Image (cartoon, grey):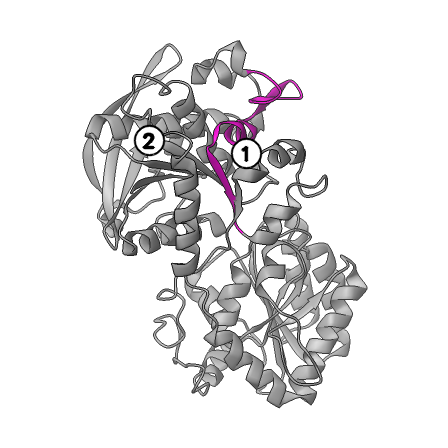
């Protein structure tokens, strides 16, 4: 099959979260199964063209409503035979931020990503590369599906292209002013409660759910949760109606990029059979983060956006108590909510040598955190899939998680009597639940070190690669194709 991915970001070109990891790695797994895959994302100003070998292809005339809006099409080799297309438009994508600037979302975001979707389809037609599957991601990619099912529904080279929408996080739906309908060239017949309309405005993800031939989410548990009132975030009825077309497919990770046996970001490599290199990673982490070089302290870490739903309202009070009463050190790498940026900085000042933080994101530091920590906190309110817990486990750092979404599908609770399981899991979204589960994990580290080491080796040996998941996506693609051919 020929498969086109349309998304707002992709590793390694531009990354703000887990979406980029999926878009960057799943196409390679599909290509290894024999498919021809291309990715289409915007050419943001922050993307290093020289580093990624990005080259100009041609100009595209994109029809938006009654306007002709030109852009440049560029491409690069993504690896494993996959190509990446880049849509260049200075006014829309040449800005300092991806989605926002100084914490304020761009007011024309819906229009910007609607343009991306239309340009992606135009690129297919102008180059003569016609995909069997249009695979759009989240609300930013959803307009491409709407265009395929309206503008390109008949008498178009794309009329037999099936559409698949992946929902990575239902908390973000592309809601905004209905004026974008005119920009998209969508008539009033589409401004209805089952398509674009949402409380008088538009909802791009809602339209994607309506028009897609198949819908996937990033874990089986999340596929179930989003059909309920709480998890559905206002779209549960639409998703329940599409339950026959809904697939819950667990995300994978790139096993070559996240491999402690060969990771170039680490001062020493290690494996499940030989964990000795972890000591050097631990020491380097302590040095880089200003922690005391204590060989026996239990290092607890977080690498995350400081965003709603990530559990920081639990982490703040729980870590305040843990730092005061447990022999632990704490490391946080991330940015977002100003309060939590301030809090971790203040915690570091009050507990020098025991707390380290980096506001922002550095990939080399993230890898070092995964490799040098003992426990990884992920007490999410909701977590569609989660990749960080898989990265941490790949490096032998045991997760402490709340049972929700993909965390429920990837972390099995520790069994104290025989050392089974591979992490520490709690149910209720309460500070005490996290604190006492964390205490249980820390006590296991000190009091049952044989269990802890066995669990380290067990989680490092688990297969989180994309190969199995890619075959499930093939099933979703065949399901979608059956509806259009």
Tell me where residue 25 appears, x and y as whole percent: 37, 54
Q: Estimate the spatial distance between the alpha carbons at disc 2 and disc 1, rounded to whole Å.
A: 23 Å
Q: Which mark is residue 187?
A: none
Q: Is residue 23 above or below residue 67?
A: below
Is any atom of residue 26 visible in this view?
yes
Give the number of callouts. Answer: 2
Q: Residue at x 40, y 35 (%)?
A: 482
- Residue 463 falls left or right of residue 452: left
Per the image, is 206 magenta? Answer: yes
Indicate whether residue 378 is drawn in magenta: no
The residue segment tinted magenta is: 191-218
- Mark 2 or 1, closer to the camera: 2
Residue displayed at 52% across by 38% down: 245
Vertical side of 240 occupied by 350: above or below: below
Residue 58 placement, left or right of 5: left
Q: Secondary structure at mark 1?
A: strand
- Can you see residue 288? no
Q: Of 475 and 224, which appears nearest the observer?
A: 475
User: Residue 169 at x, y = what percent?
Assistant: 57, 44
Residue 240 in the image, given as x and y percentages of width and height: 63, 36
Q: Which residue is mark 2?
A: 120
Q: Quadrant of the N terminus?
A: top left
Q: Is residue 468 left or right of residue 446?
A: left
Image quadrant occupied by the C terminus: top left
What secondary structure is marked by label 2? helix
* Vertical comparison of 118 with 480: above or below: above
Which residue lies under the disc numbered 1? 105
Which image quadrant is residue 43 in? top left
Mark 2 or mark 1: which comes first in sequence? 1
Q: Are marks 2 and 1 in contact (CB under 8 Å)?
A: no
């Amino acid at each position: 099959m020929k498969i086109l991915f349309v998304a707002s970001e992709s590793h390694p070109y531009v990354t703000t979260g887990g979406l980029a990891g999926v878009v960057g790695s799943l196409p390679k797994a599909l290509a290894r199964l024999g498919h021809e895959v291309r990715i289409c994302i915007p050419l943001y100003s922050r993307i290093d063209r020289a580093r990624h070998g990005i080259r100009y292809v041609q100009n595209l005339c994109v029809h938006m409503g009654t306007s002709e809006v030109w852009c440049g099409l560029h491409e690069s080799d993504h690896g494993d035979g996959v190509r990446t297309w880049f849509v260049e438009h200075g006014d829309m994508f040449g800005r300092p931020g991806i989605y926002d600037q100084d914490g304020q979302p761009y007011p024309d975001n819906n229009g910007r990503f609607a343009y991306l979707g239309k340009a992606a389809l135009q690129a297919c037609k102008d180059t003569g590369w016609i995909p069997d599957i249009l695979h759009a991601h989240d609300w930013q990619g959803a307009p491409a599906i709407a265009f395929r099912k309206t503008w390109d529904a008949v008498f178009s080279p794309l009329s037999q292209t099936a559409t698949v929408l992946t929902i990575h996080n239902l908390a973000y739906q592309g809601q905004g002013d209905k004026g974008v309908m005119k920009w998209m060239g969508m008539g009033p017949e589409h401004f209805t409660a089952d398509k674009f309309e949402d409380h008088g405005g538009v909802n791009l993800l809602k339209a994607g759910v309506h028009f897609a031939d198949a819908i996937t989410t990033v874990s089986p548990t999340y596929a179930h949760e989003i059909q309920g009132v709480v998890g559905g975030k206002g779209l549960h009825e639409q998703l329940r109606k599409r339950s026959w077309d809904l697939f819950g497919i667990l995300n994978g990770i790139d096993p070559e990029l996240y491999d402690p046996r060969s990771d170039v970001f680490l001062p020493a490599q290690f494996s499940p059979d030989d964990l000795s290199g972890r000591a050097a990673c631990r020491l380097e982490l302590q040095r880089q983060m200003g922690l005391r070089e204590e060989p026996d302290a239990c290092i607890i870490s977080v690498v995350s956006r400081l965003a709603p739903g990530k559990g920081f309202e639990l982490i703040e009070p729980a870590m305040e108590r843990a730092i005061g009463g447990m022999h632990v050190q704490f490391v946080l790498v991330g940015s977002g909510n100003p309060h939590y940026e301030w809090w971790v900085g203040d915690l570091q000042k009050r507990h020098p040598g025991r707390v380290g933080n980096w506001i922002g994101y550095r990939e080399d530091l993230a890898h070092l955190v995964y490799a040098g920590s003992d426990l990884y906190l992920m007490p999410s309110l909701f977590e569609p899939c989660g990749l960080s817990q898989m990265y941490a486990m790949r490096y032998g750092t045991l997760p402490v998680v709340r049972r929700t979404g993909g965390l429920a599908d990837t972390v099995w609770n520790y069994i104290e009597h025989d050392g089974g399981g591979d992490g520490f899991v709690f149910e209720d979204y309460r500070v005490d639940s996290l604190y006492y589960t964390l205490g249980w994990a820390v006590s296991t580290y000190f009091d049952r070190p044989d269990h802890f080491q066995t669990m380290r080796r067990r989680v490092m040996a688990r297969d989180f690669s994309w190969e199995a998941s890619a075959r499930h996506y093939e099933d979703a693609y065949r399901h979608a194709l059956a509806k259009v051919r």
